[in-house]
Amino acid sequence: MTLDTVTRGMDLRVERLATSARFISAGLVALGALVLLGWAIDSRLLKSGGAWLVAMNPLTAIAFILSGASLWIALARDSTRTRRLAAACAGAVVAIAILRLLGYVGPDLGLDRLAFSGRLDAEPIPNRMAPNTAAAFLLAGLGLLGRRSKNPRIVEATQLLVLVMAAIALVTLCGYTYKAGGLARVSQFIPMAFNTAVGFAALSVGILLVRPREGLLAELVGDGTGSRIARGLLPVVIGIPLLLGWLRVRGEQAGLYDSGTGTALMVASWVVVFGSMVWWQARVLNRADAKRTAAEKEIAALNRALRRHATEIEATNRELEAFSYSVSHDLRAPLRSITSFSQALLEDCADSLDEQGRDYLDRVVRAGRRMAELIEDMMVLSRISRSEMQRGSVDLSATAREIADELAQGQPDRDVEVDVTPGLVADGDPKLLRIMIENLLGNAWKFTERQPDPRIEFGALPGNNGERVFYVRDNGAGFDMEHAGRLFAPFQRLHRETEFPGTGVGLATVQRVVRRHGGKVWAQGKVSQGATFFFTV
């Protein structure tokens, strides 16, 4: 599985979770609106969901509408306005919860009786917002406010608060499911309504889905073996106990068995279900271990083969470098003799030669000098590859400025604007980095020769992962990007010798220096519009 495939899978899951959160937020708003409508038309079904169930308080319905709105806005386009609006809705939920909780220990403002007070008092139990409902809304509001924090600890703390809210909802739902009324209420206060508990369960899931890549939920949406197992087990862990408990209670109420028999059957069912889950999990993990072991063996074999090939390549490179250096060195003496004697013959015996003979000798001398330059460049390439590196902090700006001054002194008749960004420092071998910058600035100097207003720039740009990308830019002859692949090959030239002299080794030297420093080099350019050479070290 490639990294791109894993990333796409993660992004798809996150998008699906965000869509689920949007449905939840819309459902919460709809739930609150239907309850308010139920109070307006006095519909028991809309207020509570059933004739025997406690009705949701209108203030609770308003708090659900605010919570759903805050959740929906949080999933919309991120902007200052949406952040403020979402925070305002969440803050209103927190304020409602705090004022209602304070009403149980101090003066009661009666916020939960401002609307439909007559119908609220006419209920079998005078309808108020329950203490556990107010506590759950306080947790929900804090969860909605903390969802945007960039602090990982705050994110995890917020998610823990939301899980506590989910636990309150779960206990209440279990109380209604198993006819255990004490689980839905605090002391002698009115119990939390069934539809309120359902709303809190949905709200807790929705808040967690806002940032699924972070905090506690990150362990569920990942692509690891543990995450995949957790996603498969979670519905079973939640659903099976609830189902078995409900079946036990219903069977006992129907007289199929007594309490002890029902408990024994439920425990036996749990053993079978969870034992099957353990077996399935063990099978998945064993298969994953087998695949990992096979992959590790394959990787070990590949590493051995790579080390063997690397050793062979290193030995071959050393032989080639030694051969190149030896050939270059041994060719210099006979070539020097050919050039010297041809030059002497041209100077001392010119009168004995006709014009054609002098032209032949002149060509021999020029060819000899050209070959001497090529040999010298080959030796430079060989020395760069063979020399031992002495790393240290190198002031590239100072080096570039010094080289630019030398180029200007060598051609005082040229007026070239050279802009060097100050303070550019890199870690590397000072000698090799100087050779590299000499070649880059020398190339820029040469290829701007026919430019009426020549300009050369040496600077840096921010790269990936904090890496700094250095560059040398000029407005000279440039090059066709179709031939960019030939730029760094030894003795490859994109311009004729009559246009711009050179051997085509300078950029090959630059590439070898950059590679020895673990970096990379590339170029961009257009014909007659200049070129830019980028490098990292």
Image (cartoon, grey):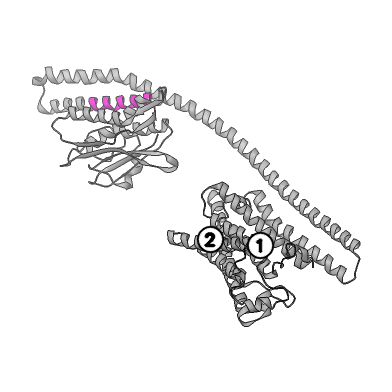
In this picture, is 230 found above or below 358? below
* Mark 1, residue position: 104
Camera-side residue of 262 and 514: 262
Q: Which mark is residue 91?
A: 2
Of the two numbered discs 2 and 1 in the rendering, the one whose residue sits closer to the viewer: 1
In the image, taking residue 303 as reference, residue 528 lies left or right, namely: left
Q: Mark 1 Cα within 10 Å, few/some/many (few <14, many 20+)?
A: few
Please state the horizontal and vertical placement of residue 491, each as a whole percent of the image: 31, 34
In this picture, is 515 found above or below 38? above
Please state the horizontal and vertical placement of residue 110, each as a whole percent of the image: 61, 69
- For the residue marked with disc 1, what is the amino acid? Tyr
Q: Is there any visible trace of residue 14 in the rendered image?
A: yes
Q: Is there any visible trace of residue 136 in the rendered image?
A: no
The residue stretch that appears in magenta: 367-383
Corner quadrant of residue 26: bottom right
Camera-side residue of 410 and 377: 410
Q: Mark 2 Cα within 10 Å, few/some/many (few <14, many 20+)?
A: many
In the image, taking residue 124 as reference, residue 22 lies left or right, namely: left
- Single out the residue that lies furthest toward the front: 107
- For the residue marked with disc 2, what is the amino acid? Gly
Corner quadrant of residue 141: bottom right
Please state the horizontal and vertical placement of residue 422, each as a whole percent of the image: 29, 34
**Residue 370 within the segment the image draws in magenta:** yes
Please state the horizontal and vertical placement of residue 297, each as a whole percent of the image: 65, 38
- Single out the residue that lies furthest toward the left: 351
- Mark 2 vs 1, N-terminal side: 2
